[in-house]
Image (cartoon, rainbow, N blue to C red):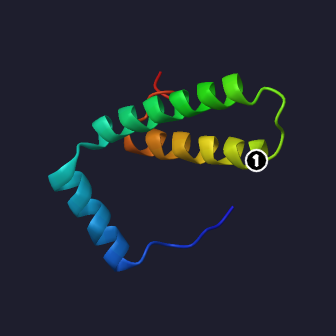
Amino acid sequence: MKTNTLSKEAETRLIDFFNHIIDPEDMAKILRQVNCILALGVMRQHETLQIGLTNFEDNYYWLNELAEILNPYLSAE
């Protein structure tokens, strides 16, 4: 896992994005929907295809992690 910190410019852009463009909870919902659609598509079209599935699994994980940061849904009690 990488532990780099965001640059001030990236941090400012993210803050601006979530303050003026889209609500973090809405973005988390979108990420979850896209992740689900992608996962279902991969499973249905490439049931036996192993090339790229590891990379897909990693990307799926990281998108879910971002969604959880934006709006803790799975870890909510």
Q: Which quadrant of the view contains residue 38? A: top right
Return the residue nearer the eye: 45 or 61. 45
Q: How many marks?
A: 1
For residue 57, side relative to residue 37 (left or right): right
Q: Residue at x 15, y 54 (%)?
A: 20
Classify mark 1: helix, strand or loop: loop
Q: Residue at x 74, y 30 (%)?
A: 46
Farthest residue in the bottom direction?
A: 8
Amino acid type indicated by mark 1: Gly
Q: Which quadrant of the view contains residue 10? A: bottom left
Q: Which residue is mark 1?
A: 52
Q: Eyeballing the image, is 59 above or below 74? A: below
Q: Eyeballing the image, is 13 above or below 61? A: below
Q: Residue at x 21, y 62 (%)?
A: 16
For residue 4, side relative to residue 15 (left or right): right
Return the residue nearer the eye: 58 or 47. 47
Q: Eyeballing the image, is 36 above or below 52? A: above
